[in-house]
Amino acid sequence: METTTTTSPSAAATTTDNPGSLHSVEMNPRHHILNRAFALIYLFAILVLFYYHILNLLHSTNSFITFSISFSILISDLILAFMWTTIQSFRMRPLTRQQYPQKITKNFNNEINNFPALDIFICTADPYKEPPLNVVNTALSVMAYDYNPEKISIYVSDDGGSELTLFAFMEAAKFAAYWLPFCRENKIIQRSPDAYFNSNYTENSETKTIKLMYENMKKRIEEVIERGKVDEDYINNEEELQAFTKYWTLGFTRHNHPSIIQVLLESGKDKDMTSHGMPNLIYFSREKNKSSPHHFKAGALNALLRVSGIMTNAPIILTLDCDMYSNDPSTPQRALCYFLDPKLRPNLAYVQFPQTFHGLNEADIYANEIKALFFTNPMGMDGLNGPNYVGTGCFFHRRAFFGTPSSFEQPEIPELFPDHIVNKPIKAQEILRRAHYVASCNYESESNWGSKMGFRYGSLVEDYYTGYRLQCEGWKSVFCNPKRPAFLGDKPISLYDVVSQNKRWNVGLLEVSLSKYSPLTFGVQSMGLVMAHCYSHYAFSPIWSIPLTLYAFIPQLTLLNGVTIFPKVSDSWFFLYVFMFLGAYGQDCLVFMSNEGTFKRWWSDQRMWMIRGLTSHLFGTIEYLTKYLGISTQGFNVTSKVVDNDQGKRYHQGIFDFGVVSPMFVILATTSIINLVAFLKSLAQIFKGDQNLDGIFIQMFIAGFVVINCLPIYEAMVLRSDKGRMPTRVTIFSTFLACTLYMAFAFLLGNM
Ligand SMILES: O=c1ccn([C@@H]2O[C@H](COP(=O)(O)OP(=O)(O)O[C@H]3O[C@H](CO)[C@@H](O)[C@H](O)[C@H]3O)[C@@H](O)[C@H]2O)c(=O)[nH]1
Ligand SMILES: [Mn+2]
C-alpha cells in the first residue's frame, strides 16, 4: 500500500520535507478513509441488530425465563457495541513516527556535553520477587547510555527496603567502573550485561575478563540473597558497613523504617577505569510506617520526584520498572528529538516507548505482547493528543508534574520548583538532610501530591491514571516506537500470574471509571469525545466480563435443553450475525497481522481475551466491589519475575501452566466442560436426526468455537501429569458445578 507522508497538526513544522527537523510523521489517509467507511457500515449493522433484538423482545410471548435469556443477550450486545464504539477512536487517525537522533548534536553545537540532564527512576519492591541481580542489570544498561555520564543520575527506589538490594547495588557500582568503558570503547549495543553475555558476542581476552568480573559480582549477590542477609565478610569497607548498621537496626521492617539514601556513585568525583566520569547512582528507600498510606508505586515515584528534585533536579525524567533494561543506548537521544522541538515542547508531558518483552514463545500463548495496548492503540492515540502512559520506558518533562501547561502548581519548597538549579554536590550535608525530609511519610499529608501534583493517587493503575489526568490538563504526549526495541522486560510465564496481574489492572481501572474523574464524564469535558473514548475503552474493560461470561454459558445451556435463541440459517437475519462475527474478528485479525503479527499470535491474543473476560475482568470486578465495601484491602501484588525452571521449560514449549487451585480456573474449567458437552450432545442429536442444524447452528458454532479455544484446558485437565496441569480439585469441583448449572437450567426451562 502506498504511504503518503502528511503533516499532523501536532507536528506541523516537522515533516520529512524539512531537512533540519529531528522527527517526522507518516500517515496513510487512504487507510483512515477505509477504516471510517467500514466503521460506518458496521455501525449500520449494529443498529439493525438492535432493531432485531427489540422486535424479538416485543413479540416474545414466552415465559419470564425466555424473556430473561433474550434480555441478557441484548445486554451483552449493548456492551459489545459500546466497546466497539470506543475502539473506533483508536482507528480514526493512527500515525507512525521517525526520529533522526543523529541530527541532534547539531542543536548542541556538536557538544554531547550540552545535552540536558537526565534523572532515571528505577522502581523495585521485593528482592524475592524481583531478583536484585536483574535490577542491577537494568540499572547498568541505562548507566551506560550513549550520553554524557555526568548528566545522568540513576535513582533506585526500593519499596522493599532491603539490605540485599543495597548490597547488590554496592557491587554494581564497582562493576560499572569496568562495564561502562567496556561498552563505550567496544561500541556495544546490548548494555545489560546479562543480555550481552547471553547473546552471540565475540569472545576475546577482554570479553573474557569482563565476563569473569560479572560472574563474580553475580555470585556474590546470589550468595547474599541465599543467606538472606549481608554478612560481614561480604562488606568491603567502613563506609558500606556504616550504611548497613545505620539503617537496618532493630525493629526495621519493610513496612516500618526511616528513609534511606545512599549515594553509591557521585558524578564529578567517581571515575571509571579509564578516568572518564560516571553517572550518579543513588539507592533510595522512602520512609514507611503503618499509619501513613504509601500509595504503592505512585507514592514511590512521587518520593523519587522530590528526592531527585533536591539532589539533581534534571528537567527530563525516565521512569523504569526494575525488569525493563535498555536495549538501545541511543534511546535518550530519540526522546530528545521531541523534547528539543520548540513547537512541541511547551505542551509535551511525556514520550512513551512501547513495553516489549524478551523471550516470548512462538505463539505467545499468554498474549503477553498485548499488541493492542502497547502498539496499535498508542499509534491511534498518537494521531490525537498522544498515547497513554504505561508505567515504564517513558521520558517525562519534569514541569508536567507541576500543574497544567499554562498554570504552574507551586510545590511547598522552592528547591522543588522544576527550574530550580542545584548548585551543591549531592553528598552535601544540607542536600542530604533536605532529601530525607522530602522522603518522609508526613511530607505529603495535606499537600497536593497525588491529586494535583506528581503521579496521581487513587488507582492501582497509577500509570494509566496519571497519563490520563495529565492529558485532561491539556498536556500532550508522543509515542516513540523505533525498529529496535528501546527496552525489553520480563513477562509473567504462568497463566495464574498473567490473569492475576490483569486482575489488578482491572481493579485499578474500575477505580478510575467509577470515580468522579471517569473518562465518560470528566474526560469527555476535558479532552473531547474521541480521546475520552480511548481512555474509556480501558477504563471500562472490566465490563467485557459481562458479555463474555454470558456468551460462554447462555447459548450452550439453552442448546443443551434444545432451546433456540438465535436466527435460523434459513432466516435472512442469519446473515447479519455472519457479517458481524466475520467483520469484527476479521478486522481485529487484520490490524494485528499488519503490525508485525503472526496468525498464531493473533489466535493466542483472541483466546486470552476470552480467558481474561472470565477471569481477570470478572474477578477484578468482584475484588473492586469487596474493596469498595470495605471487606478486603487488596493492594498492589507485585508480579513475580523469578523463573522456576520447570515452568520456564513448559513456557518455552508453549504449554499452558495452570498448577494453582484458584476460583478463576474453576470458571475456566466449568466453561470448557459445558461447551464441550453442549457441542457433542447436539452433534450426536443431529446425527441421530433428533435435531435440525438449521435452528441451532449459531449456538453450536459458538460452543464449537469455545471448544477449539479450550483445547489446552482439556489437555491440562485430562492428559497431563506435570506440575502445571489443572489441579484435580479444580477439575472435580468444576465438573460438579457444570452439572449443577445444567440441572438448574433444565429446571428453569421446564425440561425436568
Ligand atoms: O508498592 C509498590 C509496588 C510496585 N512497585 C514497582 O512497580 C513496578 C511494576 O510492578 P509489577 O509487579 O511489575 O507490575 P506490572 O503489572 O507488571 O506493571 C504494569 O502495571 C503497573 C500498574 O499496575 C505499572 O506500574 C507498571 O509500570 C506496568 O508495567 C515494579 O518495578 C515494582 O517494583 C513499587 O515500586 N512499589
Ligand atoms: Mn512488570
Image: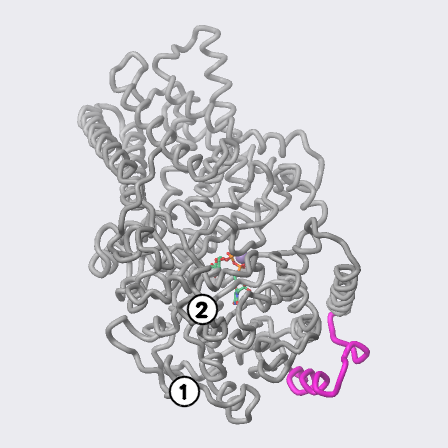
Report the Cα–Cα distance between label 1 and label 2: 21 Å
The x and y percentages for residue 381 are 32, 51
**Residue with the mark numbered 1:** 415
Q: Nearer the viewer, residue 569 or 523?
A: 523
Write down the region rendered in magenta: 228-251
Left or right: 71 in relation to 204 = left
The x and y percentages for residue 523 are 25, 58
**Residue 656: mark:** none
Q: Quadrant where the N terminus lies?
A: top left
Tell me the element at label 1. helix
In terms of sequence position, does the residue under pointer 1 or pointer 2 come before the other? 2
Q: Nearer the viewer, residue 588 or 636?
A: 588
Q: Residue at x 48, y 50 (%)?
A: 502
Residue 144 counted in the magenta span: no
Instruction: Say which quarter of the image contains residue 521.
Output: bottom left
Q: Is residue 560 above or below residue 212?
A: above
The x and y percentages for residue 302 are 44, 74
Q: Is residue 149 visible?
A: yes
**Residue 298: mark:** 2
Q: Is residue 484 above or below residue 448?
A: above
